[in-house]
Image (cartoon, helix red, strand yellow):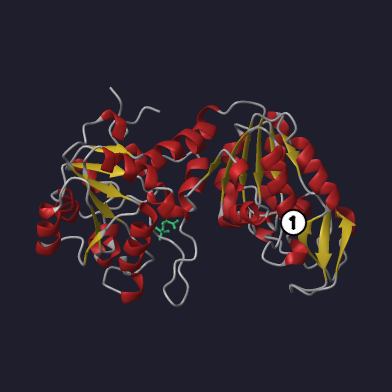
Amino acid sequence: MNKKTIRDIKVAGKKVFVRVDYNVPMDKSGQITDDTRIRATLPTLKYLLEQEAAIILASHLGRPKGSPVAEFSLAPIGRKLAALIGQDVVFAPECVGPVAQSMAKALQPGQILLLENLRFHKEEEKNDSAFAGELASLADVAVNDAFGVSHRAHASVEGITRFVPAVAGFLMEKEIAFVGGAVANAARPFVAIIGGAKVTDKIGVIENLLQKVDTLIIGGGMANTFIAASGYGTGKSLVEADKLDLARSLIGQAKERGVNLLLPADVVIADRFAADAAHKVVAINAISEDWMALDIGPASQQAFAQALVGAKTVVWNGPMGVFEMDAFAKGTEAVAKAVADSGAISIVGGGDSIAALEKTGLASKISHISTGGGASLEYLEGKVLPGIAALADKE
Ligand code: 3PG
């Protein structure tokens, strides 16, 4: 990696501003339902504490639109972090202003201060320079461990790097190595499995990966558009009529490039979109007119798993069916197992894919589970992520 990390700079005795992505899901009672993103930053925080740095943590939570909203306060996240890291986390009720300034000033080496939600100020998302300068004035150096928001040119992500030296934390380093590495120089054979409801959400990813992979597997709702584009009837399945030409062009591009493009050979069709719908497995040339495809079938599961045999790199993003309904979760679970068993460097992103890995108990067999949603997709599209680009380069 050509970006400096916290190992490359002196942090001992310094005030270190650490941008994290603690945008975690919470239930109605304010309980954190998945603390993965908090746990993922612990290696960086522990290292900084060992080095006797004073940590000033900053994050966004939700989309409060530039003013304080109680339900988006980071206070409960501070309590969770304190429990996970086993030490006090001081909470600053503001991320800028005199209170934040004096709390940051009083902070001692080995202590953690968590600032209130950055997005309570509209200047954060506007990448306002004065605001970025105020954040920077709290610290001596900045660390970005917020891969999940590195596709946003926001003040705490990008603007701040113009005021203080900025380097990557360990989570960011890992995301760059795995997700960036897959895009830049994957070990081959390289297989990508792309799923999810809509082609629209993944066009950029498919177009970019078509130039990199040996095999591209397409499943999930978006496969219906490719099935329709190949001339098959799709009944009442979700098909993006305005993307049929694009799907044909992508099929053509795969052929020209010698990429093995795999679409489902069979699907699970249902008589309606419901967990208790009547359902059956049919070949893709036999989708009944009044039914809809909601998962890939067993022959597809087998073919997709077979395509992973011998792969050296596997990227998987998006479910193979309506994963939240048990009757249509089998395809996604089978792919989770195939990716986990592949022996390849495996990189997984997207909420449903990760949930499938966790449900099947296979998460620990994956080389890298990305903490970024939109960020990992944009990275796979080959885009430059402003939060990464702004970090100091290695000499
Ligand atoms: C995410 O959850 O994908 C990141 O935290 C970014 O959030 P945003 O889409 O609200 O910028």
Q: Is residue 188 above or below residue 260?
A: above
- Secondary-structure class at tag 1: helix
Q: Is residue 265 visible?
A: no
Res. 53 image quadrant: top left
For label 1, count other residues whose C-alpha is less than 10 Å away and answer few (under 14), some (14-19) or many (20+).
Answer: many
Foreground: 110 or 160? 110
Front residue of this view, candidates 173 and 250: 173
Ligand 1 quadrant assignment: bottom left
Q: How many marks?
A: 1
* Residue found at x 44% / y 53%: 37
Q: Residue at x 48, y 42 (%)?
A: 379
Amino acid at dot 1: Asn
Determine which residue is flagged by label 1. Answer: 224
Outermost residue toward the front in this view: 86
Image quarter of the C terminus: top left
Q: Quadrant of residue 29?
A: bottom left
- The N terminus lies in quadrant: top left
Whole-percent x and y of residue 69? 31, 74
Answer with left or right where residue 394 lies relative to residue 162: right
Q: Is residue 104 visible?
A: yes
**In x, y percent, where is residue 336?**
68, 48
x and y percentages locating residue 349 in the rendered image: 56, 48
Q: Is residue 197 left or right of residue 205?
A: right
